[in-house]
Amino acid sequence: MNAVKQCVPCIRPIPAMILNALQNTHQSPPFLPQRASVLATNLIKSYFEKGSVNEAHQLFDEMPERDVVAWTAMIAGYTACNYDSLSWMMFYEMLREGVKPNAFTVSSVLKACKGMQCYSCGAAVHGLAIKHGLVGYIYVDNALMDVYATCCATMDEACMVFRDANLKSDVSWTTLMAGYTHRGDGHSGLRVFRQMLSEEAKPSTFSFSIAIKACSSTGLTAHGEQLQAAIIKYGLESSLPVMNSIVDMYCWCQNLSEARQCFNEMHLKDLITWNTLISGYKRVDSNECLTIFSSMESQGFTPNYFTFTSVIAACADLALLNCGQQIHAGIVLRGLDRNMALANSLIDMYAKCGSISDSRKIFAAMPSKDLVSWTSMMIGYGAHGYGKEAVELFHEMVRSGVRLDRVVFMAVLSACSHAGLVSEGLRYFSSMVTGYNIIPDQDIYRCVVDLLGRAGKVEAAYEIIKNMPVDPDDSVWGALLGSCKAHKLPNLGKLAAEFILDARPDMVRTYLMLSNLYASEGEWEDFAKMRNLMKGLGGKKEPGCSWIELKNDICSFVVGDNAGPQMESVYEILNSIIRHMKEAGYVPDGDFDQEDVIGVEGVF
DNA sequence: GTAGGGTTAG
């Protein structure tokens, strides 16, 4: 039957590119359609491997006969190149042309559903797989589990597929573990891993990587150390992804010395190894993060998008404008400036480094913007005192149809607060709850209390606190305390300060504010008590530190430090500024002792 | 000739 089918002449001619390929394989004419189809499918696959999506599609269009294998190569190819929607469209077109999908097709298109985060697409493919008798094929079952684990609100559907699967492999177990772990439930991820071992399924390097990731998310380093021992037992130290996961785990557990040791002991490192350490240090020590970045470049590794997001955030954290500009140049040089997430990081960096005009330029030049782009720009405007611009941007954002989230509302509330736009802010707060179904958390309440309190409506702010459905945390009380201090309301301020000190007895600033409130009321006994408590904490307090970039150096200034080569000129200028301020009518804030304002630590 | 799960960011 097959032989007869092969001899049926082509209705459409064999494309020239396939004929050339057939001649290169030293085949003699006449060329059979099936052989041409096999060759074309091979060519399609190699085009996708090179990322030549257009060539692959052109060849597919020219194929005289397109069987299920060719269609599947297109579906899988598009997904591999991150064109999940095109992959889905191919699948739809294939069904419309009456071609019956096989297990390869279904598992490929399910990967596209996962990429699109589309539960309904996945469920529709599941239905088709049942209809065509493809459920029970291990690749199909695993792909179904993966799509459900990624797109559903709970793991119930994925667990059901796992439970009903005829055959289970290490891939099935790992998919289930990853499902739990990627949604932040590392405990369940580890539970599945233990079950996997108890059922004598052999864990692969993939299983170990995800188990280590699960440890990172639970913060259970003891389990991580056991896993590290098991990795040595199984001889998997040569696996880069496994070792990279271990470095990442130590970074997340804030054990940077272990992370560094593991990193140093790795004979082979790739870009991910470096990026893992750089991102780990960015979370706790931005200076060291930049030093590691410099070592990475000097060892010949080319930074990518992951590297740049970390180092740009480190520059933002340290407010290093020159350094940030140099790294920005590196991003442009590598053609990564069109990347949306990197542009978002740059908006944030320039705003934090004091150059809001550069943030605005990057924002304006972005061909498309996401939620983070709008939010970063709004936060930048708010921090620079451009409340009205931030509010205008918020309206523009709503008009553009971007879906709003909690952080955007924090940004707009904070901007309203700094611009004194109280009624607008309250309207946004109300629409957030009623129009967008966002439940306010402590951060949002802090913004609302600050909005009212800053505008002098301190009693109204206190009413908001009293009516909160959950107990206010120290940040909410802190916003109220700040307002009480600014608007001279000692009694309410004392109440707020007491709540803060209950939760955070180590907050030196709160003792300072409270002692000044007592002083303003002439309650000298309580004033003395607070000052004594402050002295008791004094040794534990980290000194406040400021710094400034001067040419190629960074000068840092630490509170109470009088040493340093430029001390005299610094104090001379400082005193001159204070003199001008006093002449302009400034009354010094009693919360700060003047002799503690500045000191020079030196240059590093 | 077509299909799988892992590590780096926000």
Image: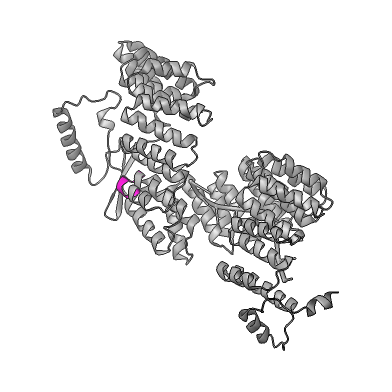
- Relative image position of residue A355 (x, y in whole percent): 31, 47
Relative to A47, is A298 on the left or the right?
left
- A374 magenta-colored: no
Identify the image's colour scheme: rainbow, by chain, secondary structure or one colour.
one colour
Height in image: A233 above or below A149? Answer: below
- Relative image position of residue A434 (x, y in whole percent): 51, 26
Height in image: A46 above or below A25? Answer: above
To which quarter of the image does residue A34 belong?
A: bottom right
Relative to A412, is B2 on the left or the right?
right
Asked whether residue A195 is in view, the answer is: no
- A353 magenta-colored: yes
The rendered magenta stretch, by its main secondary structure, is classed as helix
For image coordinates 71% across by 58% down, the residue present is A95
Q: Nearer the viewer, residue A192 or A456?
A: A456
To which quarter of the image does residue A159 belong?
A: top right
| Range covered by the magenta-colored residues | A352-359
For image coordinates 25% across by 31% down, the residue present is A595
- Relative image position of residue A316 (x, y in whole percent): 39, 47
The number of callouts visible is: 0
For image coordinates 32% across by 12% down, the residue present is A524
- Relative image position of residue A312 (x, y in whole percent): 42, 51
Relative to A327, is A5 on the left or the right?
right
Q: Nearer the viewer, residue A127 or A426?
A: A127
Asked whether residue A130 is in view, the answer is: yes
Q: Residue furthest left?
A: A583
For image coordinates 55% across by 48% down, the residue present is A251
